[in-house]
Image: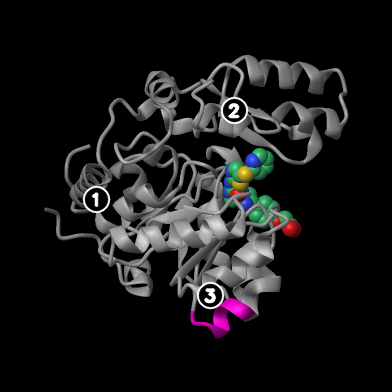
């Protein structure tokens, strides 16, 4: 058992290791969140576009599996985001992360209730705005990430955000092992958020086909669709991404492209259709070679990072 890497993030959240699990749509449900929290990091339930009462149920079920702190990720493109924001407070959830937008409108509600708020940002300007709005920390997410992304790489974004704000910065995007954690700390981060590595975890409920696709992926297997619509999304190359990119090249309009992807993440994650569905994953997919428990993943990462930070072998 590694003793841990203590940072401002572990102190802020009262956790053992500076590792946050991404609040991934469909993937980040209560089993995964509880497993990450029980392993000493912080697990997140991804509210995504789930009906608000389902989120409440997920929070309650998570609490049955862990007495450690865990959080909810509020996806701001969700028309139900406000209801989810209130449920977080009603259920006494200690930590919130947000994605795909500006959470300023909920900041007062959450801060008043003592919720720790950690917006995910993809630019220095948004990080500054979040600090001014009262955020406790920010996740600086580079475009190596899976799912909805910004345009700056983690290597360039994290030090610029760390220079711009005084609150703790958590690095995300392209981080899948202890080298990534050590590097993030060198860039000025106080911890990491990982999504893709946890998708392959034993406790992750994604369909076996999704996991298998991820374990077989190489470094160059992901593609970004939706550049032309202003909603770029990184996922593994398949019939869906090829069709999307073909339509985009032909100048298809936003609605047509939206129609194509409607329900496509669910199709891959739940039904296991990794050919016609959307298999969101980050660029580190090629680094994941086996299914491991969340505890094994976190122990391995922290141990490797600790050895490197102490001047050990690479
Ligand atoms: O949110 C994510 N990743 C996601 S959300 C998601 S669900 C979805 N599925 C299909 C299409 C679109 C969304 C899948 N993956 N990461 C955090 C993140 N947030 N990355 C970038 C941003 C971001 C973008 C713009 C944060 C703030 C922002 O501000 C814009 C504004 O409102 O000014």
Label 2, ligand 1: CB separation under 8 Å: yes
* In the image, residue 267 lies in the stretch drawn in magenta: no
- Callout 2 touching callout 3 (CB < 8 Å): no
* In the image, residue 112 lies in the stretch drawn in magenta: yes
Q: Residue at x 52, y 42 (%)?
A: 26
For this view, does 64 lie left or right of residue 222? Answer: left
Asked which quadrant contains residue 197, the reply is: top left
Q: Earlier in the sequence, mark 1 or mark 2?
A: 2
Position of 115 relative to 238 (above/below): below
Residue labelled with disc 2: 278
Q: Nearer the viewer, residue 257 or 140?
A: 257
Q: Is residue 31 visible?
A: yes
Q: Earlier in the sequence, mark 3 or mark 1?
A: 3
Q: Position of residue 216 (x, y in %)?
A: 39, 18
Asked which quadrant contains residue 180, the reply is: top left
| Boundaries of the magenta span | 109-114
Q: Separation of disc 3 and disc 1 at Cα?
A: 32 Å
Position of 292 relative to 101 (above/below): above
Q: Earlier in the sequence, mark 2 or mark 3?
A: 3
Q: Position of residue 188 (x, y in %)?
A: 43, 60
Q: Which label sits in the foreground, 1 or 2?
A: 2
Q: Separation of disc 1 and disc 2 at Cα?
A: 31 Å
Q: Is residue 120 visible?
A: no
Tell me the tag on residue 302.
1
Residue labelled with disc 3: 89
Asked which quadrant contains residue 99, the reply is: bottom right
């Amino acid at each position: 058992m590694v003793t841990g890497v203590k940072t401002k993030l572990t102190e802020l959240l009262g956790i053992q290791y500076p590792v946050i699990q991404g609040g991934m749509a469909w993937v980040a449900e209560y089993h995964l969140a509880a497993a990450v929290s029980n392993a000493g990091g912080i697990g997140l339930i991804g509210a995504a576009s789930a009906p608000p009462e389902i989120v409440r149920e997920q929070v309650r079920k998570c609490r049955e599996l862990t007495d450690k702190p865990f959080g909810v990720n509020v996806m701001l493109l969700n028309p139900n985001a406000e209801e989810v924001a209130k449920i977080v407070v009603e259920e006494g959830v200690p930590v919130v992360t947000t994605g795909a937008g500006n959470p300023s409108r909920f900041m007062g509600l959450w801060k008043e209730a003592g919720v720790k708020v950690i917006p995910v940002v993809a630019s220095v300007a948004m990080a500054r705005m979040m600090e001014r709005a009262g955020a406790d920390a920010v996740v600086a997410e580079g475009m190596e990430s899976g799912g909805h992304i910004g345009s700056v790489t983690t290597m360039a974004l994290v030090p610029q955000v760390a220079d711009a704000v005084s609150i703790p910065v958590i690095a995300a995007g392209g981080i899948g092992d202890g080298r990534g954690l050590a590097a993030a700390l060198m860039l000025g981060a106080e911890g990491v958020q990982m999504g893709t590595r946890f998708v392959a975890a034993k406790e992750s409920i994604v369909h076996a086909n999704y996991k298998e696709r991820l374990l077989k992926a190489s470094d160059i297997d992901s593609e970004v669709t939706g550049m032309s619509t202003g909603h770029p999304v990184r996922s593994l190359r398949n019939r869906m991404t090829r069709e999307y990119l073909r339509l985009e090249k032909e100048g298809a309009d936003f609605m047509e492209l939206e129609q194509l992807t409607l329900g496509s993440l669910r199709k891959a994650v739940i039904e296991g259709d990794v050919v016609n569905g959307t298999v969101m994953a980050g660029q580190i997919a090629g680094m994941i070679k086996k299914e491991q428990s969340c505890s094994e993943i976190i122990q391995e990462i922290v141990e490797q990072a600790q050895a490197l930070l102490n001047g050990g072998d690479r």
